[in-house]
Image: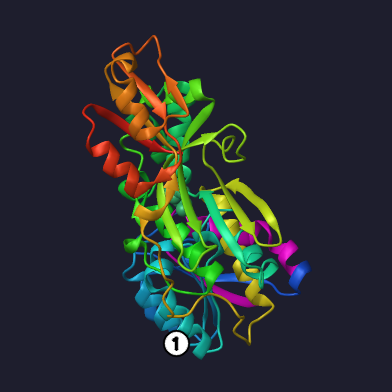
Amino acid sequence: MIQVAVMGFGTIGSGVAEVIDINREGILKATGRELHVKYILDLRNFPGNKYEDRIVHDFEKIVSDPEIRIVVETMGGVHPAYDFTKACLEAGKHVVTSNKAVVEDCGTELLEIARKHHVNYLFEASVGGGIPLIRPLTESLRGEKILEIQGILNGTTNYILSKMNREGQTFEEALRTAQELGYAEKNPEADVMGHDTCRKIVILSMLATGKEAKYRDVHCEGITGITPTDFAYAKKLGMAVKLVGTSRMGGSRAGIFVCPMLVPADSPLYAVNDVYNAVMVNGRTLGKVMFYGSGAGKLPTANAVVSDVVEILGHLQENMPFGWTSEKLPLADFEDQEFRYFVRFKGQYGNRIEEIRAAFDPEKVIELPEYPEEFAILSAKMSEERFQRKQKAFEGVLQVIRC
Ligand code: HSE
């Protein structure tokens, strides 16, 4: 019997206890070992809960108990989650987490501590919720040169954008539903401003390159400025607005960025709706593969956490080669990235044809009868630096979305 402690009995933590129970026999059959949740650390009491008798309020109980081999951290936030994780690893306990803030912010140090103490620090659930993604990326694709990763990595914003698109809901209505369903972070700013997606694409980039990057150094835009009018144009273009995290790793510097993008109907990302996430990985010899599944939610995310716990059962005495080191990943300037640009302008295209053509060489011009006071273009491909320089000279730019 392997004793496990769960720190944080919120949505994911309670899901972990459930998944360990539901999959008990399957885990036993697959590994020959039984998992038992001995402690659940939380500030609250849970009277009447099935796991009420396991609740503890003192972290010392977990870290000082030699019976505890694996600790699950589902607390959220950096402190005290980081401090507890560090203490557990130093005490020779394996740690599994869904906490991308700690992984992105402190992962380099925690991975190093895990190596030193011959234990593992795993975080499958930190990116893509329930999608088996990190293990295929780091095991099946070990040795392959990853050229690009592009993904819809945040269930909440994908849910909001899908609702706005299909049901004409406002941003606020769709956000409220996402929060009620338990998808959104406590502070929805992390989701809607793109920070959650940014942490996730940075974690994937570090895993793909073995080098360290920081999300604060990455260009990041959220979805709060996306309006129903943008969806009307997107539909006309046969496209969808998605919040996309991209990491271009083919050159000597990685181009990592997060922004809303117009995705064409022939992209596999186009059909990814609601709380689903999808990650496209382009490998030098592999070509493109896509990982798809529930990007958030209690049991899918808890399943990913438990998959790490089960993985550790086969490596209780050793540190598996995994993660990245403190070597810095060189980052490309966002200004050097190239896109096509969807731009909405005030006024009539007929009055501005020459200046628009000279600056943006548009591939398409869209005029919608329901919006007679404006028009939109889809520009030729150009660098961000060139686009910003050109658009500064224009009056009446209503919206810009990259493509
Ligand atoms: N708030 C996150 C999301 C949870 O919506 O994707 C899963 O990381």
Check mark 1 vs ligand 1: CB closer than 8 Å? yes or no: no
Magenta segment includes 15: yes
> What's the magenta bit mostly, secondary-structure-wise?
helix
Determine whether, in the image, residue 310 is placed left or right of residue 236: right
Q: Residue at 44% of width from left, 48% of height from top?
A: 338
Q: Quadrant of the N terminus?
A: bottom right
**Residues drawn in magenta:** 1-28
In this rendering, would 181 be left or right of 370? right
Q: Position of residue 59 (x, y in %)?
A: 38, 76
Q: Residue at x 68, y 59 (%)?
A: 23
- The vertical placement of 62 against 395, above or below, is below
Q: Nearer the viewer, residue 6 or 336?
A: 336
Q: Report whether residue 204 is seen.
A: yes
- Residue designated by label 1: 90
Q: Is residue 183 magenta?
A: no
Structural crowding at the residue carrying mark 1, measured as other residues with C-alpha within 10 Å and reported as few (<14), some (14–19) or many (≥20): some
State the residue at coordinates (38%, 73%): 106
Count of marks placed on residues: 1
- The percent position of residue 364, horizontal first and vertical second, equals 46, 25
Q: Amino acid at mark 1?
A: Glu
* Near-viewer residue (43 or 119): 119
Residue nearest the observer in this picture, 160 or 330 = 330
Image quadrant in which you'd find residue 362: top left
Q: Position of residue 248 (x, y in %)?
A: 50, 58
Q: With 203 as the anchor, is 124 left or right in this view?
A: right
Residue 247 locus on image (x, y percent) = 49, 57
Q: Secondary structure at mark 1?
A: helix
Of residue 155 and residue 62, the one placed in the foreground of this image is: 155
Decide if residue 122 is in sight here.
Answer: no
The residue lying at 39 percent from left, 9 percent from top is 369
